[in-house]
Amino acid sequence: MKNYVLALFFLFFCNFLFAQNLSGIYHTDFNDLTLHQNGNKVFGTYKYENGRIEGVLNGHTLSGWWYQSNGKGKFVFEFNSDFSKFNGKWGYNDAVPSSKWNGTRLKTP
């Protein structure tokens, strides 16, 4: 019985770790966004104005900075439970993000 409980705990723990990975390609309001996660750090690129993002994942919330050839600013993405979709906001420079930036995962790595 003890081994069974340990095995279940191990499977749950591994499933939790893998479920937290949001790496993949997302179709968004600003073309496809490719995200790569390393720990709680997330980096990504998108084709709109040579865009890229850098952020930190805390639970299901990714927040950070976007950079494009025409400017930069802050963003916040709220992912659903399996990281297949996000509702996001962006803003210029230090402004509070308030403009829509949503996405749906197309492909995992």
Image (tube, rainbow, N blue to C red):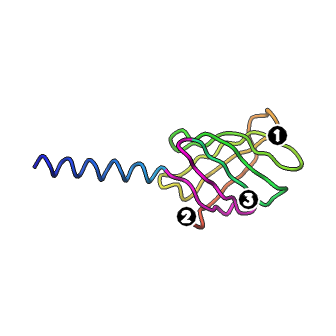
Q: Closer to us: mark 1 or mark 2? A: 2
- Label 1 and label 2: CA atoms lie apart by 29 Å
Tag 1 residue:
92
Q: Is residue 32 left or right of residue 71?
A: left
How many residues crowd around disc 2 within 10 Å: few (fewer than 14), some, or many (20 or more)?
few
Say which amino acid is labelled 3.
Asp
How many residues crowd around disc 3 within 10 Å: few (fewer than 14), some, or many (20 or more)?
some
At horizontal 59% and vertical 60% (from top left) the residue drawn is 24
Q: Earlier in the sequence, mark 1 or mark 3?
A: 3
Identify the magenta region.
21-40
Q: Residue furthest left?
A: 1
- Label 3 and label 2: CA atoms lie apart by 19 Å
Q: Where's residue 67, x and y in %?
A: 79, 45
Task: In this rendered view, identify the residue nearer to me: 51 or 89.
Answer: 51
The part of the image, by quadrant, that contains residue 106 is bottom right
Q: Residue furthest top?
A: 94
Tag 2 residue:
108
Provide the secondary structure element on which disc 2 rests: loop
In the displayed structure, 28 sits above or below 95; it is below
The part of the image, by quadrant, that contains residue 32 is bottom right
**Quadrant in the picture for the C terminus:** bottom right
Q: Residue furthest front?
A: 38
Say which amino acid is labelled 2.
Thr
How many residues crowd around disc 1 within 10 Å: few (fewer than 14), some, or many (20 or more)?
some
Q: Where's residue 69, x and y in %?
A: 88, 50
Say which amino acid is labelled 1.
Tyr
Asked whether 26 falls inside the magenta stretch, the response is yes
Task: In this rendered view, identify the residue nearer to me: 41 or 100.
Answer: 41
Tag 3 residue:
29
